[in-house]
Amino acid sequence: MIKYTISVILLTLAACMVQQFLPAISGLHGARVLILPLVFLCAAVSVDFATMLLLAFICGFLWDAQHALGPHGGDPEVYTNPVESLRFGYSIILYALMGLLMQGIQPLFRKGKWHISSLLAGIAIFLYLFAEYLLINFVRGDFVFPPTAFYRIYLTSALTMLFSPLIFWLIFQLASACHHTIRYDGLKSKARYLD
């Protein structure tokens, strides 16, 4: 279990690095593939609750470090033109909520129905982006929700969801390499009937 947890954390760090090189697609209202949240969601359904919370902290911290401390925000003494943005740490809570959603369908995942987890990953990313947008509007003090923002949120979650089978395949390969068993209760019950 320890080797698998360490390998999932390393996969998360690799996803954070890859995220830096994934551009927005201008033809799709600026949508992009969010590989770091996707790796978190796919891993969250395959680990226990404590490991999921650790991954939520790591991913939320890395996400905020990438986005909240750039030249557009952060310390006003360092950055002379700060804008209204969310405070550092909000993503940790949102990641934990997404992880709780994935942990809720873990029994289905253990029965071999990973495609439901794949669909829920897209839904979780949509809810994450929508909640983030609502929080930003709350911080700014007004509510503006143009159709392009909805299209960007929707298309980003759909594009990201398309890559979930690849991430699940990577997680299964890591589990196999670490000799970690991701249980499939459905396969065990079928094996009992065959005996």
Image: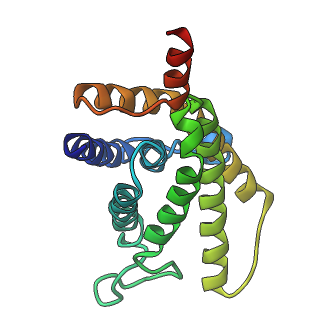
Quarter of the image that includes the N terminus:
top left
Residue at 67% x, 62% y: name it: 130
Task: Choose top left, top right, bottom left or bottom right for residue 181.
Answer: top left
Residue lying at 52% horizontally and 41% vertically, measured from the top left: 33
Colouring rule applied to residues: rainbow
Q: Is residue 79 above or below residue 19?
A: below
Q: Nearer the viewer, residue 60 or 41?
A: 41
Residue positioned most to the top: 194
Indicate the position of residue 166 as horizontal and vertical percent values.
Answer: 46, 27
Position of 169 with respect to 178 (left or right) is right
User: Residue visible at 60% across and 38% down?
Assistant: 108
Image point (40%, 64%), residue name: 60
| Residue, far front | 195
Closer-to-camera residue (51/138): 51
Return the residue nearer the eye: 71 or 133: 133
Q: Residue 182 location, x and y as percent?
A: 39, 34
Vertically, is 194 above or below 40? above
